[in-house]
Amino acid sequence: MTSIQPETSAPGLRAAVAKLPAYVAGKSAESGLTAALASNESHFAPLPSVVALISAEAGRIHRYPSMGAVEARDAIARHHGVSADEIAAGPGSSGVLQQIISAVCDHGDEVVFAWRSFEAYPILVTVAGAVPVPVPLLENEHHDLEAMNAAITDRTRLVLLCSPNNPTGVSIEADALEQFLRSVPPRVLVVLDEAYIEYQRGPGLDALDLYRRYPNLCILRTFSKAYGLAGLRIGYAIARPALADGLRRTAIPFGVNRMAQAAAVASLAAEDEILARTNAVAEERTRVVAALRSFGWVVPDSQANFYWLRASDELRDQLLTALSDAGILARGYAGDGVRITLADRDTNDRVLAVLSARERFADQ
Ligand code: PMP
């Protein structure tokens, strides 16, 4: 066998792409560890009604799916009380976000987002040839909306807000968001990424109400988290018809497969079952966060299906090792901390057992 030599004249990558950090996916159940708590997946098995529909669709995969995901968009639109022409679906909400960036950003345009937040943001922005403008979170882990507003320039086309924020779990407050929307120039698109919104309890904000009042607001949702369809890939944007139309034009043809489309429709029809599941997670969240605080950990109020321990790299490594020794996979972030996904009570208790000995670990 001849080995392939690097060619100096071979087709190269764009410089921006060559320098990109890889998206680090949380390792999954295949890692061999018994508790995969690194990817914010739903720990519940897929709903039987959804599995039955997917099986039926499997017999039709020699045919292309609906190009415009018509039935799924109709069901999503009915669910939110908007029209189907305000919905654009894509392969996961990260797929939709890629469509949004390529629909609104020219080369060199700026995209403002909080940091740390969802790690795909800087990657997707850079791939599109746009410029990431990360704005550090406040010390209390909230978005620094004032600083984000101040970071807007003539080149800013897009602001990405994440609520509840991944990986900190902290939600943006209604008044703060309204004030932000009032001050952002109307030519700047504001995307509110609500990937974890189904886990929000308490007052929260009504994104649909704001969407009706602020035409430059776009809401991003996914079926990957609370609906448990991470492996199928479907998410969507709610946006003014002209923008939603633009997003559909930037989509890969037939990018949302037919099983994902059918599963989305079936999942929306199973709202009660989904609510029972998110209620169970929210109850566990209250219990686990209270226990962690009683052990002496500083844990921000999470509104998502995970919680956050800010940590030095030393503490992060200690935590990941101790958890891994107990068969638990969590997600560490260099320079920032550790994120742990909530699961069933027994699994959460295994995490608590590791973290109960606060004195074993470095300061937070
Ligand atoms: N937004 C946020 C905040 C996320 O955490 C994720 C998944 N980690 C996504 C979007 C993308 O999810 P998906 O592409 O599976 O819809």
Image (cartoon, rainbow, N blue to C red):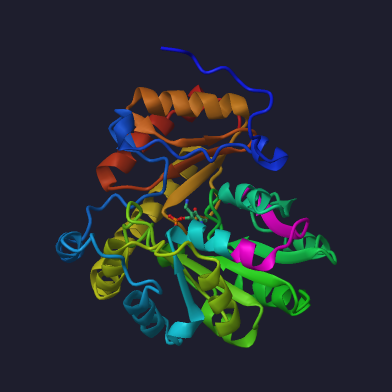
The one of 243 and 188 positioned closer to us in this rendering:
243
Query: Is 185 situated above or below 362?
Result: below
Q: Is residue 354 left or right of residue 18?
A: left
- Point out residue 94 in the picture as x, y percentages from the top left corner: 50, 57
Q: Can residue 204 be seen here?
A: no
- Is 49 contained in the magenta span? no
Q: Is residue 98 left or right of residue 198?
A: right
**Residue at (67, 58) in percent of width and height:** 143
- Point out residue 255 in the picture as x, y percentages from the top left corner: 41, 61
Instruction: Tell me which corner region of the image, top left, top right, bottom left or bottom right, holds residue 29.
Output: top left
**Residue at (85, 67) in percent of width and height:** 154
- Is 113 contained in the magenta span? yes
Query: Is 207 situated above or below 221?
Result: below
Magenta residues (range): 100-117
The one of 183 and 356 positioned closer to us in this rendering:
183
- For the C terminus, the image quarter is top right
**Residue at (37, 73) in percent of width and height:** 69
- For the N terminus, the image quarter is top left
How many numbered discs sit on the rendered protein?
Answer: 0
Query: Is 23 situated above or below 61?
Result: above
The one of 208 and 232 positioned closer to us in this rendering:
232
Query: Is 55 situated above or below 241?
Result: above
- Point out residue 352 in the picture as x, y percentages from the top left corner: 37, 37
**Residue at (46, 67) in percent of width and height:** 221
Instruction: Tell me which corner region of the image, top left, top right, bottom left or bottom right, holds residue 259.
Output: bottom left
